[in-house]
Image (spheres, helix red, strand yellow):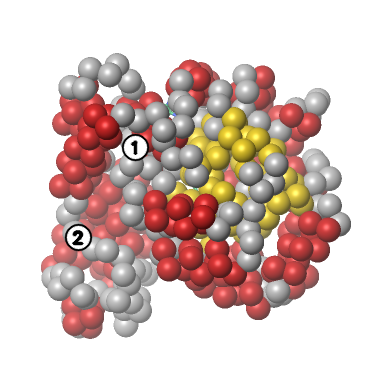
């Protein structure tokens, strides 16, 4: 296992980190298979993983108590523990202390190593600034409840840069994989943060499990044609590991087999490990996957707010996701949540306000109809 250094912090972390958002479950997301999950986390730590990532909301609030059990008996001392402030629940300054103290209790520890503002976007960032979150982080560092402060991120690059510039964060957690190089913070954000001393942790390196054997057949054939004898997951990890700015690659492993495979893969993943030929192969896969996109929406959100509350870019994102991977199961599930909130395409009255605003000149009304047909 390679260890990379957060230079400013003097901390060395294992390149593979354990993401505790997709632990094995029994009857539903909150019903974690405790024995197996504890066994897996300890197995990973025994074989070199020293970074464990959890959060308030994972597994319907059951991930942190599970992590506490897994890290009992000496494992906490071998681990950098990362967890996150549920920013969307914060309405007043006192909430900041409440959620941190409660999370210390749930995680069974007296300090968090990496405390992140969870899933920041522009709106959440604005709200947190109103409750003086930066002073709170300073105070929590001083009194020892947290060692390092960071944030995880899901919004546009410009917002990412604003946040990086606002405070010398110790780390930033971004979504990055060979398909999502330009999505959200992307490669440019990664470099921007690293140049300013904010090291990067990556989430969704396998795009939540899609850049694996679940790839469309043609994409798998492109990988096979290279005769590299690597699994699709290994290809995806290899691409992320190639960037020295990245200190930890989090994977949410749902079974012992996946954990064992990932440990094997990371035994052979030094930095700068991707040859030019291998990079070309992945670029071919990326081009192929992008050719399956149904709607060339760039998520600029000029179409929002829709007067009838239709969440246009989100619908197109899910439509594209289903088409790229030839599997609409996940996108349909997500679409149901939009239906519940009255934000799905059936709320469209074809007023055309979105089409007038769209810089890509998309026929949004017609495309929404098609998306609805695929997703509803
Ligand atoms: N802060 C945030 O906003 C945020 C958002 C997302 C994630 N995260 C954190 O980042 C972590 C990593 O993200 P992620 O879980 O999306 O990572 P990921 O590695 O992209 O996806 C994990 C999924 O990939 C599949 N998988 C893993 N290893 C595999 C292998 N060797 N072969 C085949 N399939 C494999 C499994 O899915 P199947 O079981 O379906 O096969 C697993 O559940 C999360 O666990 C969480 O801790 C944070």
Near-viewer residue (249 or 43): 249
Query: Callout 1: 10 Å neighbours few (<14), some, many (20+)?
Result: some
Placement of 211 over or under 95, stated as above or below: above
Query: Callout 2: 10 Å neighbours few (<14), some, many (20+)?
Result: few
Quarter of the picture containing the C terminus is bottom left
Which residue has dot 1 on it?
210
Question: Mark 2: which secondary structure?
Answer: loop
On the image, the x and y values in percent for residue 114 come to: 68, 48
Ligand 1 lies under 8 Å from the Cβ of mark 1: yes
The residue sitting at 55% across, 26% down in the picture is 2
Q: Which quadrant holds residue 32?
A: top right
Placement of 33 over or under 85, stated as above or below: above
The residue sitting at 76% across, 52% down in the picture is 146
On the image, the x and y values in percent for residue 373 come to: 19, 56
Q: Which quadrant holds residue 328?
A: top left
| Circles 1 and 2 in contact, beta carbons < 8 Å | no
- Number of marks in the rendered image: 2
The residue sitting at 21% across, 22% down in the picture is 226
Question: Mark 1: which secondary structure?
Answer: loop
On the image, the x and y values in percent for residue 270 come to: 47, 27
Placement of 126 over or under 66, stated as above or below: below
Q: Is residue 344 left or right of residue 246?
A: left
Q: Which quadrant holds residue 63?
A: top right
Tell me the CA gap for discs 1 and 2: 20 Å
Which residue has dot 2 on it?
296
Mark 1 / mark 2, whichever is N-terminal: 1
- Numbered circle sitting on residue 354: none
Q: Is residue 227 left or right of residue 254?
A: left
Quarter of the picture containing the N terminus is top right
């Amino acid at each position: 296992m390679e260890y990379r250094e957060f230079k400013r912090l003097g901390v060395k972390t294992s390149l593979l980190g354990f993401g505790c958002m997709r632990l094995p479950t029994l009857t539903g997301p909150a019903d974690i298979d405790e024995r197996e999950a504890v066994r897996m986390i300890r197995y990973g730590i025994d074989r070199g993983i020293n970074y464990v990532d959890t959060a308030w909301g994972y597994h319907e609030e059951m991930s942190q108590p599970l992590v506490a059990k897994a890290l009992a008996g000496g494992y906490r001392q071998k681990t950098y523990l990362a967890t996150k402030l549920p920013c969307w629940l914060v309405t007043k300054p006192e909430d900041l202390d409440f959620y941190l103290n409660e999370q210390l209790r749930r995680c069974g520890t007296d300090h968090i190593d990496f405390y992140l503002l969870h899933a920041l976007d522009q709106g959440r960032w604005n709200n947190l600034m109103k409750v003086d979150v930066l002073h709170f982080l300073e105070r929590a560092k001083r009194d020892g409840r947290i060692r390092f402060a960071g944030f995880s991120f899901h919004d546009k690059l410009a917002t990412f840069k604003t946040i990086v510039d606002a405070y010398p964060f110790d780390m930033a957690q971004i979504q990055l994989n060979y398909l999502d190089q330009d999505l959200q913070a992307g490669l440019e954000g990664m470099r921007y943060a690293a140049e300013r001393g904010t090291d990067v942790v990556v989430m969704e390196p396998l795009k939540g499990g899609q850049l694996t054997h679940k790839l469309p057949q043609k994409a798998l054939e492109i990988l096979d044609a290279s005769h590299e004898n690597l699994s699709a997951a290994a290809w995806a990890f290899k691409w992320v590991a190639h960037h020295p700015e990245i200190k930890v690659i989090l994977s949410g492993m749902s079974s012992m087999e996946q954990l064992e495979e990932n440990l094997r893969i990371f035994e052979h993943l030094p930095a700068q490990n991707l040859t030019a030929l291998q990079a070309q192969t992945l670029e071919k896969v990326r081009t192929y996957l992008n050719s399956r996109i149904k709607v060339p929406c760039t998520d600029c959100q000029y179409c929002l707010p829709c007067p009838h509350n239709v969440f246009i870019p989100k619908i197109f994102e899910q439509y594209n996701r289903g088409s790229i991977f030839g599997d609409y199961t996940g996108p349909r599930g997500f679409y149901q949540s939009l239906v519940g909130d009255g934000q799905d395409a059936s709320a469209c009255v074809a007023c055309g306000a979105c089409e007038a605003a769209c810089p890509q000149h998309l026929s949004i009304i017609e495309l929404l109809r098609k998306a609805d047909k695929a997703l509803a």
